[in-house]
Image (cartoon, helix red, strand yellow):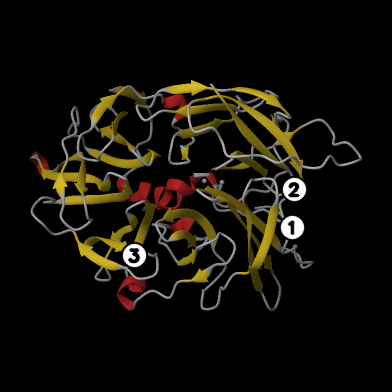
Amino acid sequence: MSPIATNHHETRSERLKVLAIGLAAAWLLAGCSVAAASPSSTRAQPSPSASSSAIATTPPNPTPTPLPSVGAAPAGDWAGIRWISAGPVFPQTPTAGTNKGSLVTVSVYGWSRGYVGFRTAIEQGSSPSVTMVSTFSADGLHWTAGQPMEVAGLESWVDITQVVEGPSGLLAVGRYPGAACGGPATINALWTSTDGLTWSLVQPSADFASASVYWVDGGSTGFIASGIEKDGKAQAVWLSADGRSWTVVPLTSPTFGKFVLDGASNFAGGYVISGAILKDAECGQTWVTPSLWWSADGRSWTRSQLPGAENANDAWITTTKVSDHALMAVANEWDEATRVNSQQVWVSNDGRTWKLVASPSNFLGDGIMTDGQRGLVLIEPGAGTDAPPTVATIGDDLTVKTLSQTGDVPIYSAALTPRWLTALGPTGVVILSSEGLDLWLGVPTAS
């Protein structure tokens, strides 16, 4: 266990307010403010801040160079990244309004068949309006803008905080931006797509719509959502094959006992629920133990063994896909007596058997993107430096391999507020500046 000293302990209630909007979306939002004419998870991150692009390269040639053709990324180990500066190829549709306070937000995600982006224009004034347009690219360089997405019936504009992939295609997750400050942040809208360009607003059943759904994940086994049923008490997961029709599975079997739900994931190995077992202690205290449960079908669950998991005054655990064949679980535990947070990390290839490993903490703080074959992280350079990001692959056993970088390497500028959006897809990694005006594609090279 690696202790991390702290003077403040974030309670489970406080953490839900922040974490529910962060999860894979932590790469897309930056607190509660949104930038004018500006928009991060995987990546996986919440609402844009008022800043210029934090990436700079050599001024472009007055005569634009035709964009090259790129093929699929190497299937094996990667040795480096060759960067291509594509400039303003991300569609600037819709445009910002002219009224004071009008703004534009931007986000980008990767999936098995390409990359998807969203650009939302919020027009303030006596008759506020919202226009959200999706964009698609098969290779990360050549982009096509789609038709405006359906937003009828929504109470306000939403932030697209996740895009997850299942057997039937994509599921985009929308949350009202105010939820980032008032949490817990529930899911307020869902859209499905089979091609990443045309999206359909989901009209959920009354039971699903009235529940408090906090998390959603997608994988080769389908989609899973988790939260609290409409009675405000019963914890549950919902399963879906297509992202449109959902079936509730109450978590009431004896295998759960008295517990608190932290989230749910799915991958090739099945479904995994993360949470904490509660146990009453002396003097009215409650001990909690970070715990995981596995299921092949999302309906019948068994508790997994977590070697080294310890009781704590407070604890929570989250799971992240490293690839379609590996999950990482991270438990954060609080000791009231020592006032210290500690962290433990496990990995699993099947969701049932977990191995306690040393945490590469420097590479986990910003989240892991995955293309199904490997994990990838981009780490911003230290404060006060003009430098490129660190790019590293994360193996199924959490082995970290830093990649060399060549070509039009994007440079983080210490003089500007940090802000970039990233996505991992079939040809490599995309970096998009916060206002959507500059784009880089990092093409992987094989070992």
Q: Work out which residue is located at the far right of the displayed protein and give it.
A: 62
Packing grade of label 2 (10 A; few <14, some 14-19, many >=20) is: some
Quadrant where the image shows the N terminus? top left
Q: Earlier in the sequence, mark 3 or mark 1?
A: 1
Q: Secondary structure at mark 1?
A: loop
Find residue 290 and report its horizontal and vertical position in percent.
Answer: 22, 39
Instruction: Name the residue tied to disc 2.
Output: 437
Amino acid type, mark 3: Ser
Q: Is residue 204 shown to the viewer in this render?
A: yes
Q: CA distance from mark 3 to mark 1?
A: 34 Å
When asked about the image quadrant of residue 319, the answer is top left
Q: Is residue 235 above or below residue 432?
A: below
Find residue 324 and report its horizontal and vertical position in percent.
Answer: 37, 42
- Name the foreground residue: 67 vs 250: 67
The residue located at (69%, 70%) in the rendering is 124
The residue located at (34%, 38%) in the rendering is 325
Q: CA distance from mark 3 to mark 2?
A: 36 Å
- Name the foreground residue: 75 vs 261: 75
Query: Where residue 92 is drawn, which disc sits there?
Result: 1
Q: Secondary structure at mark 3?
A: strand
Q: Secondary structure at mark 2?
A: loop
Contact between marks 2 and 1 (CB within 8 A): the answer is yes
The residue located at (67%, 53%) in the rendering is 35
> Which mark is nearer the camera, 3 or 1?
1
When asked about the image quadrant of residue 132, the answer is bottom right
Query: Where residue 212 is drawn, which disc sits there?
Result: 3
Q: Is residue 22 above or below residue 183?
A: above
Packing grade of label 3 (10 A; few <14, some 14-19, many >=20) is: many
> Which mark is nearer the camera, 3 or 2?
2
Contact between marks 3 and 2 (CB within 8 A): the answer is no
